[in-house]
Amino acid sequence: MDKGLLIFDLDDTLVHSKIDFETLARWIRRELVERGVVRDHLELETMSVSQLLQLADLFDREHGTSHGAEFWRKVEEAEMAGMARATVEEGAPVVLAELKARGFTLCILTNNTRLVATTVLQKFALDQYIETLVTREQVSRLKPDPEGLLRLKEKYREQVDRMFFIGDSWIDGLAANRAGIPFIGFNCREPRDVKMVANVSNLRELVKLLEEICPLEEGGCGG
């Protein structure tokens, strides 16, 4: 086959949606403590927004409450506001077109909703290069859980020889490590001991790295 699969994270990898995750996370942490979902704020400090939300969902299932639904609405409001201000990563349309032309299968795994993801991809005409888009509605557990990556791995395992996941966050890297998929960091500033093939700073560096790893002129990853 000699084919390669590239799975991209979306936000802060291919696009920049300007979502203020830090402020959002602080608000959720405060609410979790004030509502008695957890007692100690410190145990929440290292958690991502997706992990905080799943903590609330678990509490709701166990106690018959609905804190998570309110938190999710807040997140969706922030996502829609961020989408309106979104910008595209420099070179993304050209690089994706080039990678697809050279035989790579391109997919996206994001913790965003399908509405947010498809809207921003269409805004920058990136959707035409993506074969499969996996959003949070399609998984029961978000990154850093490997569920989404494992689904893509199973879907393409007989079609490609090698696959890589490219993302900006430790939650992307941890999901990749857990799924057994090589991880390429993209300006990953807080790796948290995640195993990486490399940590590139832009899409052109990614192309150069793939040229070293995979015979792009043959359209994939040999050996």
Image (cartoon, helix red, strand yellow):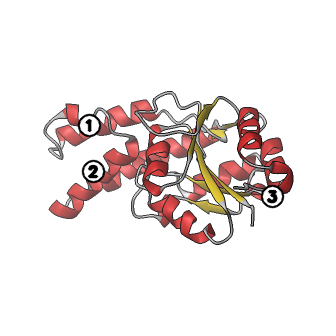
The residue mark sitting in front, 1 or 3, is 3
Labelled pair 1, 2 in contact (Cβ < 8 Å):
yes
Residue 55's disc is 2
Classify the position of the C terminus by image quarter.
bottom right
Classify the position of the N terminus by image quarter.
bottom right
In this picture, residue 193 sits left or right of residue 96: left
Is residue 101 shown to the viewer in this render? no
- Please report the residue visible at 26 percent of the width from the left and 37 percent of the height from the top: 44
Residue 173: x and y in percent read 48, 43
First of labels 2, 3 by sequence position:
2
Q: Amino acid at mark 3?
A: Gly
Residue 21: x and y in percent read 45, 35
In this rendered view, identify the residue nearer to me: 131 or 219: 219
In this picture, residue 63 sits left or right of residue 215: left
* Residue of label 1: 44
Q: Amino acid at mark 1?
A: Leu
